[in-house]
């Protein structure tokens, strides 16, 4: 392992829960610096020995679909270069290729790692030949390219990058541990943004079909906020399930375990998904899961206890929910699910893999 006087500059969004986990985990082994395009919404960074600088771009800008509006990121280069000169890092690690990876390329550091996170490799290069060219230039500037999932590594292979290292977003299995559930009502649910891509409308339709074949008292809880809230409430009313569906609102990641504790089954019916951290978190708390057979979800859904469905297989998903009415089956599958996460996606193992990459590069 590298000695503590080794320095690393992380280029990533300070408001991402994944960034927070990486930075905190590295503090004991490195002199860590963090540069973020957006300013912190929460002061967590002040609690750790991290040198921090933000360009303080509008957070809404990072969510813009228009690449033109994101060109303002180029204005951050001068600010970043000054910070880079000040901290003089031995290693640079950029998270998300088409924003922070672009900034890393401008630094020209010869020991740079770029980690792709999702839409930067699954969507961005498909927009045009120019977008693909832009992404490939960014990735070629890195000494090492990492992916958080096998699904994304395949996309990188198609772009010509064969030696991609897979370092998943692991789960803190001590935090997301098994809990004693005492739900009086069979409770199905999800924790996702209320956006079209995450298929909450599909979940509502599957649940409505399940209600038609079940005599068990049940409810559906949906945690999250987003642009589709009004449309989803309207759909629940049209399906005549509005009285048994509750929209619980946004829950901060630090409190997200409490959402899983309120559920008996976790559903993820995304139309696109690069990985599936929430699916791992849910399984780590001994929840059986139902997932769409999309993107990175098959690799994070335990094959022994979880179930995968095509997005048009509403009746099969509904029948599986009926099978899981049996508490003994749920408990057994939940234990299998947690073991799967502990064996394959424990956070400490992800950190060890990443530190080994740093060690090799340094």
Image: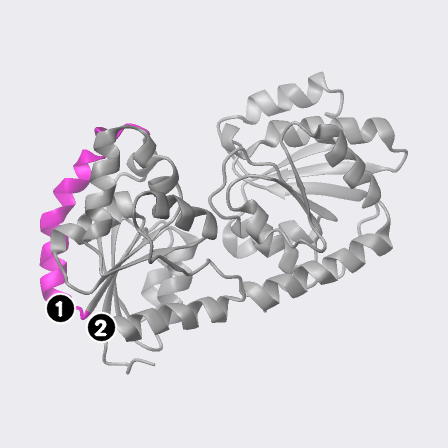
Is residue 359 rendered to the left or right of residue 285?
left
The residue located at (21%, 39%) in the rendering is: 134
The residue pinned by badge 1 equals 88
- Tell me the residue at 56%/46% (across/down): 297
* Residue 98 visible in image: yes
- In this view of the protein, which residue sits in the foreground, 256 or 42? 256
Where residue 7 is drawn, which disc sits there?
Answer: 2
| Quarter of the C terminus within the rendering | bottom left
Residue at (31%, 29%) from the top-left corner?
A: 127
Q: Is residue 73 above or below residue 27?
A: above
Furthest residue to the top? 238
Magenta segment, which residues? 65-90
Residue 247 in which image quadrant:
top right
Q: Are marks 1 and 2 in contact (CB under 8 Å)?
A: yes
Q: Position of residue 216 (x, y in %)?
A: 88, 37
The chosen color scheme is one colour
- In reply to whether residue 233 is colored magenta, the answer given is no
Where disc 1 sits, the SS reads loop
Question: Mark 1 or mark 2: which comes first in sequence?
Answer: 2
In the image, taking residue 221 as reference, residue 163 lies left or right, namely left
Residue 287, position as x, y percentages in the image: 70, 54
Report the residue that reaches farthest toward the right: 215
Kind of element beneath mark 2:
strand
In the displayed structure, does residue 185 sit left or right of residue 143? right
Q: Position of residue 210 (x, y in %)?
A: 79, 31
Image quadrant where residue 214 sits: top right
């Amino acid at each position: 392992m590298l000695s503590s006087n080794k320095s690393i500059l992380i280029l990533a969004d300070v408001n991402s829960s994944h960034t927070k986990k990486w930075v905190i985990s590295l503090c004991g082994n490195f002199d860590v610096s963090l540069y973020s395009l957006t300013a912190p919404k929460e002061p967590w960074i002040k609690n750790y020995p991290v040198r921090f600088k933000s360009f303080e771009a509008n957070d809404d800008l990072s969510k813009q679909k228009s690449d033109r509006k994101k060109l303002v990121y180029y204005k951050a280069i001068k600010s970043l270069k000054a910070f880079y000169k000040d901290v003089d890092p031995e290693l640079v690690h950029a998270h998300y290729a088409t924003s922070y990876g672009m900034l890393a390329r401008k630094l020209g550091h010869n020991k740079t790692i770029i980690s792709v996170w999702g839409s930067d490799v699954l969507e961005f290069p498909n927009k045009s030949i120019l977008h693909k060219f832009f992404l490939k230039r960014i990735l070629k500037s890195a000494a090492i390219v990492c992916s958080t999932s096998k699904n994304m590594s395949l996309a990188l292979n198609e772009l010509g990058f064969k030696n991609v290292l897979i370092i998943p977003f692991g789960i803190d299995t001590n935090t997301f541990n098994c809990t004693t559930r005492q739900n009086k009502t069979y409770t199905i649910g999800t924790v996702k943004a209320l956006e079209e891509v995450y298929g909450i409308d599909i979940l509502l339709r599957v649940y409505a079909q399940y209600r038609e074949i079940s005599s068990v008292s049940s409810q559906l809880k949906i945690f999250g906020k987003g642009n589709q809230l009004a449309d989803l409430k309207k759909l629940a009313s049209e399906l005549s399930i509005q009285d048994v569906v509750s929209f619980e609102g946004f829950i901060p990641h630090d409190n997200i375990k409490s959402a899983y504790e309120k559920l008996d089954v976790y559903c993820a019916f995304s139309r696109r998904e690069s990985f599936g951290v929430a699916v791992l978190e849910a399984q780590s708390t001994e929840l059986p899961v139902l997932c769409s057979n999309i993107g990175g979800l098959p690799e994070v859904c335990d094959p022994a206890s979880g179930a995968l469905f095509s997005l048009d297989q509403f009746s099969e998903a509904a029948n599986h929910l009926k099978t899981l009415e049996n508490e003994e089956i749920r408990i057994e599958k939940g234990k299998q699910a947690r073991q799967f996460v502990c064996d394959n996606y424990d956070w400490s193992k992800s950190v060890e893999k990443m530190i080994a990459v740093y060690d090799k590069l340094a």
